[in-house]
Each structure stands twice: as structure tokens, then as C-alpha cells.
């Protein structure tokens, strides 16, 4: 249990940092592009300010990623012993992508005024692309745990191993798509929220308004696209992991016209959900495109194969609710930029975006919880139990406390640093247009 | 293909030892620099390693990925029985990486800098120490999957004279590498002299701790002497390392900057070669005398095949880009004091 908590904590931490590290370079590239095209100083300032954020997040993302590559073995040696050669392929490619990202970032951060401007811009774009590629590859490893392929499991032996087939496992596409869009949405809203706060306080309005617009458009488009990928994912889950889907929906009874259950408190003992809104037939429709086909419920899944229902259900509902909220905000934003320009600096509009700062990441964490908790008790769906994978070393809970302390202090440090960066914006960038680099 | 993978594993360890080592060493040098000179050392160091430090540490990730994809049993055994030193090393890596970034990107320059510096220098010392301990433990024959009590299984597997001596040996090598590197970055004679003095101290420390490693190996019944001197390659490598060390000091006195880096790198190569050659392909030696071998305890053929191809393809992208990065920041005026320092 301590091992699971430590892993959850490390991943929960890493997921935020790597999302930001993989999406922000794209924001940066846009403002950088605008600077190169228009020559407006403010865009260069925005790019530089963001690049510092990227550097901080990249470094923390990189160390937390290094830690994870060790933790896999430190906590789950049995899992790694068998799974390593099968699902390791994306990791070895990810190593390459990550390496390229680090090199490109070196060029980008230290390359102002040293290289051809467009070469410099391209290195920034490479940071983003290779970051995105590593994200997609890492998700391949996780989706393999959900839909293991590329080997035969006979009498406890893993034979006929094919790492390429394992990498292109059936759940990869849907999961990677869902995760990437989520990363854009979450980061877009988080960054937009911070800039909205600064506009609201009337600090450096020009600087923050332009940053806000770039971040928000990414976030908004991603939020509007997300339901599509969510639908693909849900269909995949229904096919591969009926127990997970049933837990997500707190769907106890297998019956035709399966209802979509919204909200409510699952009562596991009596196999029902209290205080929920039920839309008859909707679940069948979402999964099978018709209202009639029954969706497998928890009553057809043996007790020991069921994940924790309440946690999975709540996490799923939370994710969907926050996703809807982001979509609503997205629609508002589109109206604002097309029809009602004045909204952009209106108090209520900014307040909504400020409130929305963390919700993308809360949704990401909730979604992560769904996929991980929903897979329990398996670490490799249908093949290996989590309990069998854990390290034999006693006293893992001490290690958990240690890592908790480290991550908590790291998060505080990062927030503190960003706060100071933002606070310094007026000092660094607010003077009249300066010679090329702001010293 | 298995040999391609093994060569990549060895080369990434070597590059991590040289590039990452010099990086750690910079922190170690800072730790042993008198306070008035600290900020100068820091500035030189930052200019020297800033653009490439992230890349330096990728080699460890590459090595670990090769290990868990290609040699899962070895990875699982190490991470089970060397759990504690690995965790400490990870803490060092986290602390060091973040402290370095934070001190460069904190927009406000105040007392927090002191905190970052403290964390940075101590973790620069601890990380290679435990890396060395882990490396020593793999061949110390103390890793014992049959142990039936906590101390034998999880503590004495790495806490022994031999492993700890290797830890200190590694640390002084890192310091030596950094000092040699920084000699070339010095801007005036006083700085240069101070780095030469540091290189000398680190050199002595490496020789002394190296001798201690041999003493410890005899005490712990580890046939290190035989591994190193029992075969031609070992003797030749040690001989070449010694010769190149003499040449190195001669060239330092001649005022050379770049060739001495190559020589220091060459010495590391020789050291890693002697220590790994004789018991290759056995990478972990267990208490009961059996081995975990790179040739036996490896992943499925298809995996090794795919891994080898991935590594070859990856290096096509990585190596040219990396060389260009190092080269372009080497060549251009080092007087830039990075734009980020506003």
C-alpha cells in the first residue's frame, strides 16, 4: 500500500510537471513567432518570461522522471523483471526523445543572439515536439498495462515476446490522444488563469493580455476537442476493461438500456447508487451507439476482480464535470474574441478564468486516478496482480514518507519561484522598449 | 545485437562518468573552495556547464533504460537489494538538479541563493559517493538474495569497506575531472593557478582513495588485484592511465587547455575498462558466488534486437546535435554571462 501511494504521489507530481514542460514550449513558439514576424518587443518579453517557466518545469520534470525510472524497479521489481523487456520499447525511444529535448532546450535557452533567429526559433519548436513525443511514448507504456499485448502468457511464463507489438497496443492511440489534449487544456487554462489574475490586478496589462490570449486559445480548443477523444477512450475501456468502465459509472446491474449515472453515492453493499441522476439507455448509446445493448455491470464481475468502486466513480465524475466547465468557459472565450472584445478585460470574465486556473490539472489527476485505480487489483490487466509485483523489502512506508516530504517541499519551492518570477515582470520587462535583450 | 546493446550500456556509463562526473565535480570543487572565491568559481562553472548540464545527466537515464529493458533480472535484483543507496542517490539527483535550476532562475537575488548553494554543493558530493557505492556493491559479492534478515539483505549489501572506498574514489575522480575542465575555462592566471592546485589535490585524493580501494578489497576478500593485474588488458590500461597522467601534468605546466581534457577523459576510460574487463560479462556478483551475466540474464531476443536498433537510430539524432551544442558554446565568446541573468 505504501508502495502504491509512493508511486501515485511520484506520478501525480510528474504528470503536472511534464504536462507543463511539454505544452508550454508551444506557447513559447507562438509568441516567439509573433515577435519574429511583427518585431513587437512585448512578444519577445513574453517568450523570455515563459522560457524561464519552461526551464524550471523541465528541470523538475526531468528529475522527477529520472526518479520514476528508478522507482519502477525500487518499488515493483517483480513487475519490471517480467514486463521490462515487453513494454520497454517506448521507454528506450522516450529516452531518445527526451535527450533531444534537453539538447534543444540548451540551444534555446542559451542561444538568444547567438544563432540565426529562425534556427533559434526552430530549436524552441523542437523542444515542444520532442517533449510531446516523449509524453506519447510514455503513455504507450501505461496503455500496455491496460491492454497487454505482444507476448503469450503460458503457465506463468512470458514467452514469444514482441516489444513492437506491445508498443502498438490497442489502447495506445486512445489514451495518448486523450492525455495530449488534456495536457494542452490543463496547461492552457492554468497559464491563462495566472495571466488573467495579473490583468485583473491591472499589472502590465499589455504583456499579460497577450500572454493570456495565446495560452487561452490553446486551452480552449483542447477543451472543446476533448469529449471526442474521451468517447474513443471510453469505447476502448468498455472493450478491454469492463470492470473499469463499470466502476467509473458505478454501473452495478447488467441490463438492456443501461443508464448513464451522473453523480450519486455508490452503495457497494446493496449494489446501487443513491441520489444519482440516471439517463436510461445513454450508457449503452455512448458505448455501443445504440440504446439497447446491455453494458456489462459489476454484477457480472467477480468480487476479487473489482477495483475500488467509490474512488473510481468519484474521480471519473469529477473529471467529466471539470471538463464540462472548461468547455463552457471555452465557448465564452470564443464569443469574447469574436463578438465581445470588451469581455477580455471585464472583471467577471477574468474572475472565471482565475477560478479555472487549477481545474485542468485537477481533471488530469482525476483522470489518472480513474485509469490507475480502475485497473486494480491488476498491475498488468488480467496477467499480474499489483500485490505480487511489489518489492519484498520491508519498511517501504519510510521511503514513502521521505518522498512525500521531498515532493511537498519541491512543489512549494516551484510555486515560490514562479511567484517571484511573476512579481518581477514589471521590474524586468516594464521599462520602455529596450535594446534587443533586456538586461 | 546483444553486443551493440552492451557497448551502448558501457559507453553511456562512461559518458555519465566523464560528463556527469565533471558536473558533480564542479559542485565538489565549490564545496572545497574558500568562501571569498566561491562566487567566482560558481560563475565560471555556470558558464561552462549551463547549456549542457541537462544533457550530461541523460546518460544515466539511457543506461538505466538499457538495463531495465534489456536486462530486467539484473535491474530487478539491483533495485531490490540496493534499494537504500539508490534512494539516497535519487535524493541527491533531485536536490542537485533543482537547486542548480533554482539558483539560476530565481528572479530575486537574495538569501535564498545561499540555501540553493548549500543544497547544490552537498548533493554534488553525496550523489557520486553513492553512485560509487552502488557500482562497488555490484562486484563486491555482498548482494545476497538468500539473506534472511534485513541487515544482510538491505544494509550490508552496500555498507562495507570496499563499496564505500569505491564511493570516495568516484567522488575524487569527479573532482579531478572538474578541476581539469575548469583549468581551461579560467580567465586569468590567478584563477588558473587555483584550479591547477585543486586538480593536484583531487589527483592526490584519487590516488589515495584508489589505494584504499585495494586495501579494502583484500580485507573483504575481493579478488580485485587479480582482476586488474591478472590479465594483459588490465595491466596495459593501468599503464596507459599512469603514462597519460604524467603527460597530463607535463601539458598543464605547458599551459595547454583542451588536450588535457581529452587526457583526463582517456584516464576515466582506462579506469572503467580495467574495472569492468575481467569479470565481464558478469555485472553483478552475488554472495553465493554466482553471477548475473549480461549474456545470460538478458531479455528476449526480439527485445534486444529492437532495443539495439532504437539505440542506433537514436544516436544518429542525438550525437550530432550534442556535438553541435557543445561545439557552438565552446567556440563562441564565453563572455556572454547568459541572457537569462537579467
Image: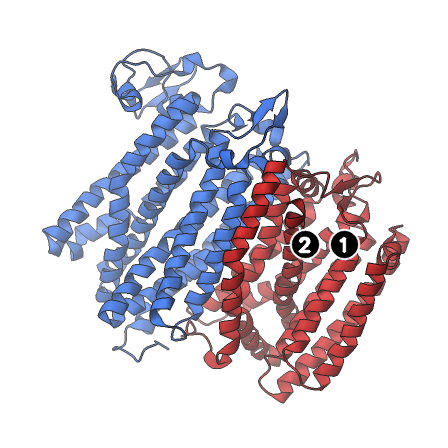
- Name the quadrant of the C terminus of chain A: bottom left
- Closer to the camera, A178 or A421? A178
- Closer to the camera, A143 or B314? B314
Is residue A116 something that shows in the picture? yes
Residue situated furthest left in the rendering: A339
Distance from label 2 to label 1 (Cα)?
9 Å
**Given the image, what chain letter belongs to the residue carrying mark 2?**
B
* Vertical position of residue A391 compared to residue A411: above or below: above
On screen, residue A311 versus residue B191, left or right, reads: left
Provide the residue designation for mark 1: B276
Q: Are marks 2 and 1 in contact (CB under 8 Å)?
A: yes
Is residue A204 something that shows in the picture? no
**Residue in view at x 65 percent, y 39 percent:** B72
- Closer to the camera, B144 or B9? B9
- Name the quadrant of the N terminus of chain A: top right
Measured as percent of width and height from the top left, residue B114 is found at 54, 69
Answer with the quarter of the image where residue B213 lies.
bottom right
Q: What color was chain B assigned in the picture?
A: red
Q: What color was chain A assigned in the picture?
A: blue
* Vertical position of residue A82 compared to residue B199: above or below: above
Amino acid at each position: 500500500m505504501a508502495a502504491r501511494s509512493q508511486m501515485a504521489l511520484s506520478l501525480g507530481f510528474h504528470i503536472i510537471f511534464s504536462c507543463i514542460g511539454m505544452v508550454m514550449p508551444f506557447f513559447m513558439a507562438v509568441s516567439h513567432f509573433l515577435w519574429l514576424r511583427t518585431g513587437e518587443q512585448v512578444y519577445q518579453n513574453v517568450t523570455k518570461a515563459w522560457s524561464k517557466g519552461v526551464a524550471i518545469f523541465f528541470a523538475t520534470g526531468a528529475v522527477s522522471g529520472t526518479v520514476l525510472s528508478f522507482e519502477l524497479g525500487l518499488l515493483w521489481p517483480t513487475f519490471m523483471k517480467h514486463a521490462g523487456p515487453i513494454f520497454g520499447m517506448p521507454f528506450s525511444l522516450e529516452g531518445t526523445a527526451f535527450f533531444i529535448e534537453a539538447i534543444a532546450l540548451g540551444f534555446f535557452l542559451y542561444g538568444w543572439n547567438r544563432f540565426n533567429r529562425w534556427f533559434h526559433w526552430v530549436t524552441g519548436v523542437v523542444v515542444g515536439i520532442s517533449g510531446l513525443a516523449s509524453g506519447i511514448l510514455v503513455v504507450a507504456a501505461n496503455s500496455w498495462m491496460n491492454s497487454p499485448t505482444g507476448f503469450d502468457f503460458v503457465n506463468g511464463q512470458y514467452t514469444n515476446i514482441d516489444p513492437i507489438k506491445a508498443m502498438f497496443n490497442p489502447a495506445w492511440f486512445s489514451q495518448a490522444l486523450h492525455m495530449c489534449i488534456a495536457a494542452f487544456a490543463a496547461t492552457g487554462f492554468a497559464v491563462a488563469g495566472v495571466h488573467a489574475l495579473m490583468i485583473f490586478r491591472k499589472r502590465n496589462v499589455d504583456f499579460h493580455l497577450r500572454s493570456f490570449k495565446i495560452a487561452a486559445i490553446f486551452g480552449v480548443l483542447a477543451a472543446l476537442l476533448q469529449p471526442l477523444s474521451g468517447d474513443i477512450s471510453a469505447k476502448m475501456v468498455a472493450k478491454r476493461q469492463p470492470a473499469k468502465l463499470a466502476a467509473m459509472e458505478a454501473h452495478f446491474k447488467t441490463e438492456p438500456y443501461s443508464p448513464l449515472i451522473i453523480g450519486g453515492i455508490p452503495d457497494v453493499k446493496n449494489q446501487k447508487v443513491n441520489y444519482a441522476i440516471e439517463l436510461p439507455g445513454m450508457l449503452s448509446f455512448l458505448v455501443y451507439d445504440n440504446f439497447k445493448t446491455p453494458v456489462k455491470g459489476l454484477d457480472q464481475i467477480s468480487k476479487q476482480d473489482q477495483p475500488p468502486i467509490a474512488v473510481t466513480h468519484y474521480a471519473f465524475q469529477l473529471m467529466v464535470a471539470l471538463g464540462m466547465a472548461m468547455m463552457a468557459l471555452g465557448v465564452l472565450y470564443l464569443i469574447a474574441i469574436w463578438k465581445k472584445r470588451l469581455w477580455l478585460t471585464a472583471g467577471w470574465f477574468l474572475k472565471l478564468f482565475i477560478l479555472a486556473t487549477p481545474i485542468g490539472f485537477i481533471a488530469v489527476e482525476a483522470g489518472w486516478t480513474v485509469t490507475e485505480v480502475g485497473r486494480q487489483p491488476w498491475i498488468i490487466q488480467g496477467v499480474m496482480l499489483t500485490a505480487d509485483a511489489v518489492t519484498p523489502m520491508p519498511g517501504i512506508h519510510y521511503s514513502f514518507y521521505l518522498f512525500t516530504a521531498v515532493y511537498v517541499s519541491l512543489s512549494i519551492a516551484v510555486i515560490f519561484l514562479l511567484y517571484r518570477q511573476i512579481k518581477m515582470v514589471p521590474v524586468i520587462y516594464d521599462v520602455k522598449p529596450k535594446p534587443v535583450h533586456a538586461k | 545485437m546483444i553486443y551493440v546493446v552492451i557497448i551502448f550500456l558501457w559507453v553511456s556509463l562512461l559518458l555519465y562518468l566523464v560528463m556527469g562526473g565533471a558536473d558533480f565535480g564542479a559542485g565538489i570543487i565549490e564545496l572545497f573552495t574558500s568562501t571569498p572565491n566561491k562566487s567566482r568559481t560558481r560563475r565560471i562553472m555556470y558558464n561552462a556547464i549551463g547549456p549542457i548540464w541537462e544533457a550530461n545527466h541523460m546518460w544515466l537515464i539511457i543506461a538505466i533504460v538499457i538495463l531495465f529493458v534489456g536486462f530486467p533480472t539484473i535491474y530487478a535484483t539491483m533495485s531490490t537489494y540496493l534499494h537504500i543507496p539508490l534512494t539516497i542517490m535519487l535524493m541527491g539527483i533531485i536536490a542537485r538538479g533543482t537547486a542548480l535550476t533554482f539558483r539560476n532562475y530565481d528572479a530575486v537575488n537574495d538569501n535564498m541563493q545561499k540555501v540553493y548553494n548549500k543544497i547544490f554543493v552537498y548533493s554534488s558530493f553525496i550523489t557520486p559517493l553513492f553512485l560509487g557505492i552502488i557500482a562497488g556493491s555490484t562486484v563486491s559479492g555482498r548482494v545476497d538474495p538468500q539473506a534472511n534478515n534485513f541487515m544482510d539483505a538491505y544494509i550490508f549489501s552496500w555498507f562495507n569497506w570496499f563499496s564505500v572506498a569505491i564511493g570516495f574514489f568516484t567522488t575524487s575522480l569527479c573532482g579531478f575531472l572538474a578541476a581539469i575542465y575548469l583549468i581551461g575555462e579560467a580567465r586569468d592566471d590567478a584563477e588558473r593557478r587555483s584550479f591547477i592546485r585543486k586538480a593536484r589535490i583531487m589527483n592526490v585524493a584519487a590516488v589515495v582513495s584508489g589505494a584504499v580501494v585495494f586495501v579494502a578489497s583484500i580485507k573483504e576478500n575481493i579478488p580485485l588485484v587479480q582482476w586488474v593485474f591478472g590479465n594483459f588488458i588490465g595491466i596495459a590500461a593501468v599503464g596507459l592511465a599512469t603514462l597519460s597522467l604524467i603527460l597530463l601534468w607535463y601539458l598543464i605546466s605547458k599551459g595547454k587547455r583542451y588536450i588535457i581534457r581529452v587526457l583526463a577523459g582517456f584516464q576515466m576510460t582506462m579506469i572503467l575498462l580495467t574495472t569492468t574487463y575481467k569479470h565481464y560479462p558478469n555485472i553483478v556478483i552475488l554472495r553465493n558466488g554466482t553471477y548475473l551475466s549480461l549474456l545470460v540474464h538478458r531479455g528476449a531476443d526480439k527485445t534486444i534486437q529492437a532495443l539495439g536498433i532504437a539505440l542506433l537510430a537514436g544516436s544518429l539524432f542525438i550525437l550530432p546535435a550534442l556535438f553541435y551544442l557543445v561545439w557552438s558554446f565552446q567556440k563562441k565568446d564565453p563572455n556572454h554571462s547568459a541572457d537569462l541573468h537579467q
